[in-house]
Image (spheres, grey):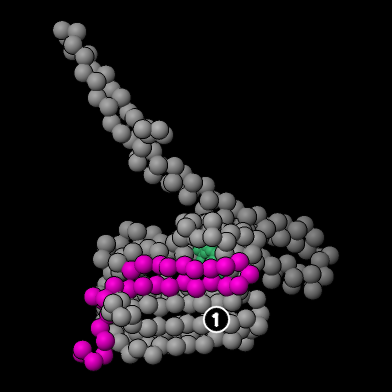
């Protein structure tokens, strides 16, 4: 097979007979490459803000008496922003690692989905700070079986992306509905910058960003959709993305029917 990695062992017995053992280690090699890339990415992501912070500290220490108060204030504000960026990254890494190393099954709460959607909407409005028109439609009253904490984090990640990738004055809509199949669908649509089709399949990879600069500017860690994907997989749910550059995006989390309990059936 082209591109396959094989580990071949030759054992020679005393009577001269030989045994050849060949093992396909393609998957192991692939995992090892992914692990190496991940460590390199994390180191890079931490090194950049750390360099900025230590640069500021050095500058201030070098000329403490001469630095005007306003300039000092400016340096400290920038250093604070970089420290916050490192904190966000570490927080997201801890969330990812907890999802990967924790129990394979999510905690099974049963909770009201409309309440969760309204809570996410309040957080989204706070994040937007009046720069976007945020609307909520959660018409189908029902309960969900799954981890409220994990699904909250997944839904909130999708909503915060919509805010971060939609210029001021844009619209962000959060919507929950039960499909005819009984599956439940939480969608976030925006009329923001959108994503070109070739990027869509890779968006949930850790640290994959269409525009690194824009992601950083808006406080992104590059791990949000990786977290979303993990949470949804643990709930046997799917992420569906439709998007068009310059027009906007729609990110939907589709939960299987067996996790959706319509109110009437209670
Ligand atoms: P980030 O912290 O960079 O936002 P994510 O994992 O949340 O990381 O998203 C990965 C990339 O997907 C983003 O960098 C961005 O390019 C793209 N993306 C995610 N959501 C949207 C959206 N609503 N509109 C446009 N692009 C998006």
Dominant SS type (magenta):
strand
Q: Residue furthest left?
A: 15
Q: Is residue 100 left or right of residue 54?
A: left
Residue 54 location (% of width, % of height): 66, 57
**Residue under pointer 1:** 172
Where disc 1 sits, the SS reads strand
- The part of the image, by quadrant, that contains residue 234 is bottom left
Quarter of the image that includes the C terminus: bottom left
Q: Which quadrant does ligand 1 occupy?
A: bottom right
Look at 75% across and 62% down and name the residue there: 60
| The one of 98 and 128 positioned closer to us in this rendering | 128
130 up-or-down from 43: above or below: below
Look at 80% across and 60% down and name the residue there: 63
Question: What is the magenta range?
Answer: 237-266
Q: Is residue 230 left or right of residue 77?
A: left
Look at 84% across and 65% down and name the residue there: 66
Is residue 69 magenta-colored? no
Is residue 246 magenta-colored? yes
Q: Residue furthest front?
A: 180
Quarter of the image that includes the N terminus: top left
Residue 17 location (% of width, % of height): 18, 11
Look at 28% across and 31% down and name the residue there: 23
Asked if one can make out residue 146 in the rendered structure from this viewpoint, the answer is no
26 up-or-down from 251: above or below: above
Q: Residues within 10 Å of mark 1 (few under 14, many from 20)?
A: many
Residue 111 location (% of width, % of height): 30, 84
Residue 229 location (% of width, % of height): 40, 64
- The part of the image, by quadrant, that contains residue 214 is bottom right
């Amino acid at each position: 097979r082209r591109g396959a990695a094989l580990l071949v062992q030759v054992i020679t017995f005393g009577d001269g007979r030989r045994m050849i053992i060949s093992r396909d280690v393609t998957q192991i090699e692939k995992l090892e490459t992914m692990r190496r890339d991940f460590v390199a990415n994390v180191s890079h992501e931490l090194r950049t803000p750390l360099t900025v912070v230590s640069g500021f500290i050095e500058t201030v220490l070098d000329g403490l008496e001469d630095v005007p108060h306003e300039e000092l204030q400016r340096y400290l504000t920038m250093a604070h922003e970089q420290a916050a960026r490192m904190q966000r990254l570490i927080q997201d890494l801890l969330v990812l690692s907890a999802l990967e190393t924790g129990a394979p099954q999510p905690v099974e709460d049963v909770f009201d989905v409309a309440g969760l959607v309204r809570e996410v909407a309040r957080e989204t409005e706070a994040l937007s700070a009046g720069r976007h028109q945020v609307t909520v439609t959660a018409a189908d009253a029902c309960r969900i079986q799954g981890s409220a904490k994990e699904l909250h984090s997944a839904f909130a990640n999708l909503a915060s992306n919509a805010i971060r990738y939609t210029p001021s004055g844009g619209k962000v809509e959060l919507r929950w509905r039960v499909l005819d199949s009984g599956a439940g669908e939480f969608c976030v649509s925006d009329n923001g910058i959108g994503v070109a089709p070739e990027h869509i399949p890779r968006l949930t990879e850790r640290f994959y960003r269409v525009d690194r600069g824009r992601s950083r500017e808006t406080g992104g860690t590059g791990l949000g959709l990786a977290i979303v994907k993990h949470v949804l997989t643990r709930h046997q749910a799917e992420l569906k993305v439709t998007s068009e550059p310059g027009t906007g995006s729609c990110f939907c989390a589709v939960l299987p029917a067996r996790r959706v309990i319509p109110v009437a059936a209670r």
